[in-house]
Image (tube, rainbow, N blue to C red):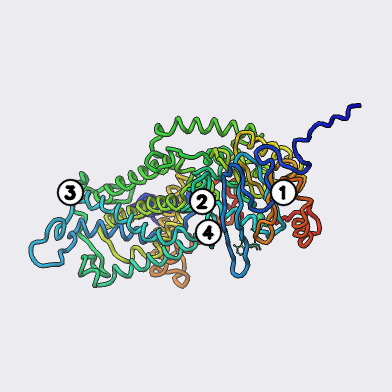
Amino acid sequence: MNWPLIISNTLFTAISIQAIAYVLAAIGLNMHFGFTGLLNFGQAAFGAVGAYTFAVLAGQGIPWPASGEPPWPFGQPWPWWAAALAVIPAAMVLALLLGIPTLRLRADYLAIVTIAAAEIIRQALIAPKLDERFGTGGADGLQGFTGGIEKINPWNGRTFYLWKQPFDGHQAFMIVAGWSLVALCSVGMWLLMRSPWGRVLKSIREDEDAARSLGKNVFAYKMQSLIIGGVIGAFAGVVFAVGGRAAAPNDYATAFTFFAWTVLILGGAGRIKGPIVGGLIFWLIIGFTEVFLSQVTRNKVVPTWLVNENNFGLLRFMFVGLGLATLVVFRPQGIFGDRREQAFDVR
Amino acid sequence: MSAETIPVPQPADGAAGPLAGIAHEPGVAKPDPLLVVDGMRRAFGGLVAVDVAHVEFQRGCITGLIGPNGAGKTTFFNLITGFDTPDAGTWSFDGKPIRKASPYRLARSGMVRTFQLTKSLTRLSVLENMKLGALDQRGESVFAGLLKPLWRDQEREIEQRADDLLQRFKLDHMREEFAGNLSGGQRKLLEMARALMADPKLIMLDEPMAGVNPALTQSLLGHVKELRAEGRTVIFVEHDMDVVNDISDWVVVMAEGRVLAEGPPASIGANPAVIDAYLGAHHDLDLGDEQ
Ligand SMILES: Nc1ncnc2c1ncn2[C@@H]1O[C@H](COP(=O)(O)OP(=O)(O)O)[C@@H](O)[C@H]1O
Ligand SMILES: [Mg+2]
């Protein structure tokens, strides 16, 4: 057993680009659920919209459907920052589409619609027709859209080490950029949630009729919350895609949403630091079980009829599930939740 | 001694103040109505919950709305405040006809209600509950919210107002507690105090005394009277006739969705139609519904 490698690999997983992506997705969900009480079970939809908006625009650009010289902005790659900015209106449009028909209705309607929307978007991205028209790459997804970011990366081509764990300059850059984005979003959330605006959001979470009776336009606030959390979720998708240098439909399947939820619940919904703590813990567990089990199976420490090199990957999610179940039983408010608040959660 | 009789200013069951000399009949016109309702109807399937032909509520007065359980009082409140939509009917508030009856717009126009089942925001502190009630907060817009200097001064002023009200309602010692830690009676007090943060012209209280212990009832009654002294208009639903007699200037009786009778409190107990309505339902005017 190579303990230094196990430990450094685990630590690296906890701060990796994947971890960042789920922390961001969970920060968005925290805005939705933790502070507003909205049930968004389709955060993957926002992730996919973010990833693909960036990948299409920064990669080939939008194909020009007619013949002849394509007019700007068609037919040519956008600068990386323009593609990143375009993610914001794209996520806003999705939030409006999801929110306008559902936010006046009971909370469950948003949940149903978001689940469906995430799956519709994933299936559409697989479809060859969408690829023909918008260059989304079909089932294989897209690559080669990170050039602009690699150009501005001062560490490009270098190799770094986290103790025994090597990683390249691109990863290093995205880790720094990604955690900076996490910090930026968290500070922004903190500023918002201490404001009267945040107070209205929390009142909607508690009882939206009470908020209405006090002159608050509940629909508008819910929509703002859905948009802000959705835009953050879309940037989770961007980080994920740029970090992995690929956007593929199946990266944004239901697992994306449920990992993000797990991260949020682990850390404690309704806390600014909840998603960060939850993300670190989630990926420490995933990272450790992954590398530990791979070592164990490779070195045949446990009998192969119990677990072998091909199926240990499944085992780690069992551990995560077990950990989550334990948490729900012993600390239902999450690791950083406030037990006193939980006491009132009986409606 | 002297045979001189002091002229009695009012008949025994008459109303005082602006409502003196007004006929005791359903739909009677008032000298200065704040709220006027016309032809308001709401049916749930076959059940007609509210069917009010015409009713006016006098400005600056406390009007008690009574009626047996299921008379449609809560539904009537919901319709007026925009929480439910009438099948037919119009109403006007402070002289302006109400076109788009969304609850938040009506609240902003000065009509704030409380709920029969209290809606205290349990995971917000008592102080935060209060501060939420203030209208026109600059920091409630998302962009201004980010920048504290834009709303710091207003927030301080709102907090001062909240503290004053908390003191008046004797909740100041609970200031930092989660509202979920308050007793039922304290929640009723908080809800009333929170509504006052909006500085409403009309405050509509749906069973403000229900489930409140007798000691608190007295102070609640005092607070309602104070509202009138401040020039606010109060409409409240209540079952205890002693309470109704004590604080209301005028009483509107509903039964089966209609306005059955109107008049000063003293005139109500003697009204045969009212006795009939209550006898049919409860056999006793003093009985209240506890939902
Ligand atoms: N949402 C609803 N759906 C169906 N029936 C309702 C609804 N709300 C009230 N009702 C019915 O309307 C009638 C009036 O109810 P309500 O206004 O609550 O009476 P009150 O407050 O005077 O006791 C009752 O018969 C009640 O059952
Ligand atoms: Mg009622």
Q: In this view, does A159 lie to the left or right of A296?
A: left
Q: Which residue is drawn at 29% across and 56% down?
A: A90
Q: Indicate if the residue with disc 3 has its beta carbon within 8 Å of ligand 1.
A: no
* Precedes in sequence: disc 1 or disc 2: 2
Disc assigned to residue B255:
none
Callout 2: helix, strand or loop? Answer: helix
- Same chain for labels 1 and 2? Say yes or no: yes
For discs 3 and 4, the disc positioned in front in the rendered view: 4
Give the amino acid type for the residue marked by disc 1 in the picture: Gly
The residue positioned farthest toward the top in the image shown: B1
Chain under label 4?
B
Q: Nearer the viewer, residue A40 or B128?
A: B128
Chain under label 3?
A
For discs 3 and 2, the disc positioned in front in the rendered view: 2
Give the amino acid type for the residue marked by disc 2 in the picture: Pro
Q: Name the residue under label 1.
A: B211
- Can residue A252 be seen from the camera position used here? yes
Callout 3: helix, strand or loop? Answer: helix
Q: Nearer the viewer, residue A198 or A60?
A: A198
For discs 1 and 2, the disc positioned in front in the rendered view: 2
The residue positioned farthest toward the left in the image shown: A68
Where in the image, quadrant-wise, is ligand 2 located?
bottom right
For discs 1 and 3, the disc positioned in front in the rendered view: 1
A115 w.r.t. B250: above or below = below
B260 w.r.t. A196: above or below = below
Q: Distance from label 3 to label 4 (Cα)?
A: 60 Å
Q: In this view, does B27 lie to the left or right of A5?
A: right
* Precedes in sequence: disc 4 or disc 1: 4
x, y (%) of residue A310?
38, 70
Q: Name the residue under label 2.
A: B103
Disc assigned to residue B85:
4
